[in-house]
Image: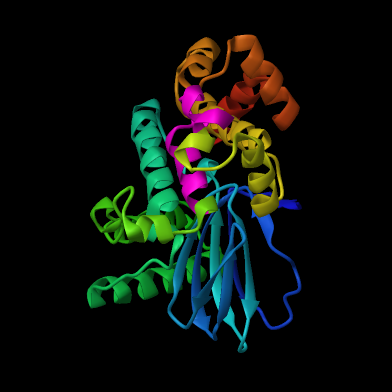
Amino acid sequence: MEHKVLHQPFELYVSDLECWKERALIYHFFEIVQIMEGTGVRRTNWNDFPYEKGSIFLFTPLDCRGFNATTPTRFCSIRFSEVFLGQYKNAQDRERIVQWLKQLEHIFSHHNRFQQLLVKDPGDCQQIITLMNLVVQEYENKAAYHEENLQHLVTLLLNILSRNVTDSTAPMAGSAECEAEPLINRMLIHIRQHISDADKLRVDYLATHFNLSANYVGEYFRKLTGESLQHYITQYKVKMVQQRLAFSNLTISQIAGELGFTDESHLGRQFRKHSGESPLEYRKRAKLLENQN
């Protein structure tokens, strides 16, 4: 399975899909996609859903995503990392950023159970269109203060989207509607919800919880996502570690305990393996970036 990373904290694309030949990839950043013209199929974690003009999709890091156009399609893609939303002017903003990132993770991971995000209020629809257009203008013109303006515009956009995402509209656990949802989606949501609870990430627990054979859990996960269950869990944990290193004053040991690592050494080995640097090196680099802002 191929992976795609974001080389800048924020990127924006307005493009056609007609000649787009990339297969579905695992992307390591948040993304808001609005379909401007066309119809086709959106693929997320090996599940296919139709799209049309006006459709809005939210993707979280580690989602495998791609699009197949049925008719000529034009889309706007806003891509950003935690670093983009985490830029702040002083230390007092730190806690606000941490809470916002947690809210962001919730919004993207639970929106409409991996279906199209439905924005029903006409006023919200119009505001989203206006904000998307302003984002495109700011990004293309790159006038003075455009970075700060982009951050504020994306925050406003996410606030509007978040009020259209409510758990009250999600299917109840065990309901027929919930059970009809693709199993891999339910597994991914479960992993994200319980990423710090090692017991609920064990193969035997997952097998019982999702009514699978313990010998088949790993094979099923790899078949549907293209990577091993343990690799996905570790990658997601490392992303959470990066967030806490950059935006909190927690010690390495505290982070290890919070996210279910055996100890500080275990966290350090896994972090270096997947990030190419130690947690302390990453935190130091994050502080340097903070001081430059």
> What colour scheme has been applied to the protein in the rendered image?
rainbow
Q: Residue at x 65, y 47 (%)?
A: 220
Q: Is 251 situated left or right of 24 in this image?
A: left
Q: Main secondary structure of the magenta part?
A: helix
Q: Which residues are magenta?
A: 185-205
- Residue 290 lies, in percent from the top left, at 53, 31
Q: Nearer the viewer, residue 100 or 185?
A: 185
Examine the rendered structure and indicate whether residue 220 appears above or below residue 34: above
Q: Residue at x 55, y 66 (%)?
A: 77
- Residue 231 lies, in percent from the top left, at 68, 35
Does 88 appear in magenta?
no
Q: Is 97 situated left or right of 11 in this image?
A: left
Q: Nearer the viewer, residue 78 or 57?
A: 57
Marker count (numbered): 0
Examine the rendered structure and indicate whether residue 260 appears above or below residue 142: above
Q: Nearer the viewer, residue 170 or 64?
A: 170
Q: Nearer the viewer, residue 73 or 220?
A: 220
Q: Residue at x 69, y 83 (%)?
A: 18
Does 193 appear in magenta?
yes
**Residue 86 in sight in this render:** no
Examine the rendered structure and indicate whether residue 91 appears above or below residue 190: above
- Residue projecting furthest to the bottom: 71
- Residue 134 lies, in percent from the top left, at 43, 70
Tell me which corner region of the image, top left, top right, bottom left or bottom right, holds residue 119: bottom left
**Residue 176 in sight in this render:** yes
- Residue 59 lies, in percent from the top left, at 51, 56
